[in-house]
Amino acid sequence: MRSMAAVAEGRGPIGWIVGQLWGERVLVASAAFVGFVMWAAGVHIGWVAFAMLLLVAAGLFRTDRRMGRPSLGRTAFSAAPVRDEAPSAPAPDPLAPYAAVLDALDMPALLINRREAVALHNRAAETLFGAIARNSDLAGRIRAPAILDMIREAIASGVPRVIEHAERLPSETVYVVRIAPLAHRWADPATEPLWLLTFRDESQAQRIQRMRSDFVANASHELRTPLASLRGFIETLQGPAKGDAAAHERFLAIMHEQATRMSRLVDDLLSLSRLEIKSNLPPEQTVELAPILSHVRDTLMPLAEELGVEVRLTVPGHPVTVKGDRDELVEVFQNLVENGCKYGQDGKRVDIRLTGGDGEPVEVSITDYGPGIAPEHVPRITERFYRVNIETNRWRKGTGLGLSIVKHILTRHRARLAVRSELGKGVVFTVKF
């Protein structure tokens, strides 16, 4: 025989009634006891049975309501189990269609409402401004008063606005900032009016334009002297010195020197222009500095020996690495060491010292022991074509662009050049990464 619990697990009304009675077995036993007492007291058997049924029915109805099951008059005898109602689906985000469109743009873009809060932004905007919380105040991310004033004017008037905005750090960047209202026929009726704010980077186009104008101005200025010298020597060789072999040899040597200087000047100008174009793109490679400094020392050894200068290199025992472009860093240190050999020749020594690494700031110092640089010249030595004591140093054939190239390379590497000089004791150039 099956137990009462087993019968209760069966299907149909019989199984349900048996299950209810088994669950209220204490009540059933109490009703039977009350019925027995009534019968013993002489109450008619019919009234005893009615009282017992009434008591059991009341107990079953109480249990049914307490457990949250359907009442006897509805679906209590249904064979199918009763399921809880499914939770209601969340309301769709009215801005969801705009998210995919904004992420497809390659420029930073934000949707803002009339309260100047960011309703939506794309990944490019997050790259430019960092993480932006939804409905956060736009003024917390954009601190430029001109942009904020333009946004307020556009929201008040409903007319698109455009301005040009320049950032100086970490490198010079120019944006064309535009705000325009979204057309109402595109927006969800339940969504408040929105404005689209975009930032178009015009830095490279402006750098190219400035590079062209600077190249023409600088080249015409710097090439004027050697070209005038070449023209004068050629006229001399064609005229008074036409048959003078000794003059030919002397003048041709000077002409070769001037042509070499012009070639070096053009190369430096082109190099400087290329660096300006990509100054806002930091290098992603990792390079070790000790081999680079060793390569620079070996490359400049013939020049140092010719000038009677000893080049010493000191590096730590552990590897020191930085994010950088190897060829550009070679150019930086080669310029600095070459300047130390040429302009610090009187000190007879140039020291290259690498420090840092293993969690410490990385620094490379190049020290010469020559005459030094006067304090009034130090702030300007990285300007284009700026030369210290140009008349006395003209024989060294510098173009005046070396330290300007160094500055632009270090700007791209997010590094700094520090200059410390004392007249009569030399100069220390320190590159700080």
Image (tube, rainbow, N blue to C red):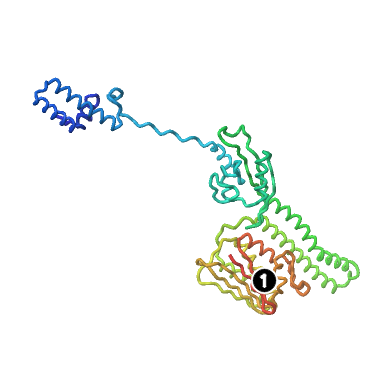
Residue 340 appears left or right of 253: left
State how many labels appear.
1
Residue in front for this viewpoint, 265 or 148? 148
Provide residue 61's location: percent of width, then percent of height. 25, 27
Neighbor class of circle 1 (other Cα within 10 Å; few <14, some 14-19, many 20+) is some
Residue type at mark 1 is Glu
Residue beneath the point at 73% across and 52% down: 209
Residue 112 appears left or right of 229: left
Provide residue 145's location: percent of width, then percent of height. 66, 51
Residue beneath the point at 48% across and 35% down: 91
Is 40 located above or below residue 402 in the figure?
Answer: above
Residue 255 appears left or right of 306: right
Quadrant holding the C terminus: bottom right
Is 216 located above or below residue 332 in the figure?
Answer: above
Residue in front for this viewpoint, 41 or 114? 41
Q: Quadrant of residue 390?
A: bottom right
Provide residue 400's location: percent of width, then percent of height. 73, 67
Q: Quadrant of residue 80?
A: top left
Q: Which residue is mark 1?
A: 338
Q: Quadrant of residue 336?
A: bottom right
Is 253 located above or below residue 120 in the figure?
Answer: below
Residue beneath the point at 64% across and 38% down: 181
Helix, strand or loop at disc 1?
helix
Quadrant holding the N terminus: top left
Provide residue 233's location: percent of width, then percent of height. 85, 68
Residue in front for this viewpoint, 53 or 397? 53
Residue in front for this viewpoint, 141 or 251? 141
